[in-house]
Amino acid sequence: MRKTVSVSIIIPNWNGKSLLEKNLRAVLSVCGGAEILVVDDGSTDGSVSFLKSKFPAIRVVAKKSHEGFASSVNKGVEASRGDIVVLLNTDVVPEKGFIEPLLHYFQNGAVFAVGCMDKSKEGDSVVLRGRGIAAWQNGFFVHERGEVDAADTAWVSGGSGAFRKSIWDTLGGMDALYDPFYWEDIDLSYRARKAGYLLKFEPKSIVWHFHDDGKIKQSFSASQVKTVAYRNQFIFIWKNISDIGFLFSHALWTPVRILRSLLNGDVWMIAGYLAALIRLPKIIQSRIQSSSYWKLRDRELL
């Protein structure tokens, strides 16, 4: 007989009161009996008081100060009661019945996470996302959107995905080194795969993602976003890659990329590299902690 699993929906929020007003009721209508938590990341727009007055059934985990996405999600998972935690961004609205197709995969104890079909509203277009592919190219880990016609995926998005809490706890959750945003879900997914766990993609679990409404674009400049993205790419490599050949190619290609950036005026890449260097002691510490779970080689994953 199929074992019944409990589900917790975790929604990280930072100054997203307008998005909560717009989307939360729709989320509630399709989540059935799942526990719902909103983790507030030190908002100053009245989000917490709004939630407590308008949605008293929702558990609110209120942080005193703003830290970032990974730290907020970790707080939510820690406070949750479900066997499976489903992460949804405030700019994401799931379609009816999106949970059940995800749960099917967790009958396999080796499955860590399952990604949703993300109908991403980008300008006037809808782009199908949710399945990722990754490769090692010219000394760097590169990732991109994959076609949504297969069940495998290189990572599961922290904005619309389901995760087995017991394995999340084993892996230590998302790494706050990536705060305030980007790469934290790719990092967690890669660590899970390197530890021998499985990731899946489910096209029948559909969510709508309104990227233009998201807080990153509204709260950070394009230059800040680029700098953080570059920084976190370096953090990911220095923390997770152990293949000697890959590390050697990274050492060779990094000066080339830096020189190209100087010539092309890409100051954000230089700033990101320097920001990663400053964090090197913490990166090494995090690498040591996660290396105890490594079972597969990087070449088997990429």
Image (cartoon, helix red, strand yellow):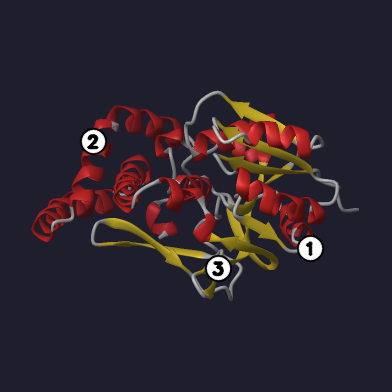
**Amino acid on which the number 3 mark rests in the picture:** Lys
Mark nearest the camera among 3 and 2 is 3
Of 247 and 85, the residue lying toward us: 85
Q: Seen from this angle, which residue lies furthest right? A: 1
x then y, percent, for residue 115: 61, 58
**Tag shown at residue 96:** 1
Report the residue marked by disc 2: 277
x then y, percent, for residue 252: 15, 53
Of 224 and 112, the residue lying toward us: 224
Which is nearer the N-term, disc 3 or disc 1? 1
Residue in view at x 91 percent, y 53 percent: 1
Residue in view at x 51 percent, y 38 percent: 70
How far apart are the two marked residues, 3 and 1, measured between alpha carbons? 18 Å
Residue in view at x 68 percent, y 54 percent: 23
Q: In which quarter of the image is residue 43?
A: top right
Q: Do the residues labelled 2 and 1 touch (CB within 8 Å)?
A: no
Marker count (numbered): 3
Report the residue marked by disc 3: 121
Is 69 situated above or below 222?
A: above
Secondary structure category for the residue under label 1: loop
Secondary structure category for the residue under label 2: helix
Is 69 situated above or below 95?
A: above
Which is nearer the N-term, disc 2 or disc 1? 1
Is 262 situated above or below 277?
A: below
